Image (cartoon, rainbow, N blue to C red):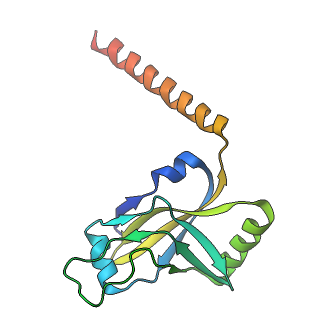
């Protein structure tokens, strides 16, 4: 059984998009980047994925430079290649081009010793969808609070 250790999550993605499907992708990194990720110095907030010439890339993912690294540190927001099966990439390319979906990184984690990125096939939320979700969460919290109060008595 593979052990999973989540390093970073993109909470903004869950707020701004409906996540239809998720995929697991490996990511091409250098040694100092992996060390920096182990320290939790990564940000997925404004990142997105693009497909170009049959390859998939993650853009805007910020990995802070490793403090003990010297000349081996890379640009923190460089474009990084993702590792997925060709069939999956072609399918995602077709869906993104035809239906207007987006590919958004959802979380970054270690699976055993390898760094994996969970990529979501997402559809954008409208403002009223976000308000509806907030109202549902608020109602759920109120119900749980009331039940908790009732069980105390």
Q: Residue at x 30, y 89 (%)?
A: 72
Q: Is residue 1 visible?
A: no
Q: Residue at x 47, y 69 (%)?
A: 117
Image coords of residue 14 (percent x, y): 53, 49
Q: Residue furthest bottom?
A: 71
Tell me: 37 left or right of 123: left
Q: Quadrant of residue 150?
A: top left
- Which one is in front, 106 or 23? 106
Q: Quadrant of residue 102?
A: bottom right
Tell me: 59 left or right of 38: right
| Up-down relation of residue 13 to residue 147 (above or below) | below
Q: Is residue 10 visible?
A: yes
- Which one is in front, 83 or 127? 127
Which quadrant is the C terminus positioned in?
top left
| Up-down relation of residue 131 to residue 16 (above or below) | above
Which quadrant is the N terminus positioned in?
bottom left
Image coords of residue 84 (percent x, y): 57, 79
Q: Residue at x 59, y 38 (%)?
A: 130
Image coords of residue 4 (percent x, y): 36, 65
| Up-down relation of residue 29 to residue 148 (above or below) | below
Q: Residue furthest right?
A: 98
Q: Residue at x 61, y 32 (%)?
A: 132
């Amino acid at each position: 059984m593979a052990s999973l250790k989540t390093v970073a999550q993109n909470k903004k993605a869950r707020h701004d998009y409906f996540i239809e499907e998720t995929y697991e992708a490996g990511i091409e990194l250098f040694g100092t980047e992996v060390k920096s990720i182990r320290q939790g110095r990564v940000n997925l907030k404004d990142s997105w994925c693009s497909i170009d010439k049959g390859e998939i890339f993650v853009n805007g993912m910020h990995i802070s430079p490793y403090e003990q690294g010297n000349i081996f540190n890379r640009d923190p927001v460089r474009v990084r290649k993702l590792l997925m099966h060709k069939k999956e990439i072609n399918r995602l390319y077709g869906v993104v081009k035809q239906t207007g979906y987006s590919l958004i990184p959802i979380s970054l984690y270690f699976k055993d010793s390898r760094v994996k990125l969970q990529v979501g096939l997402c559809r954008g939320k409208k403002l009223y969808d976000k308000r509806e979700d907030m109202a549902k969460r608020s109602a759920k919290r109120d119900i749980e609070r009331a039940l908790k109060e009732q069980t105390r008595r």
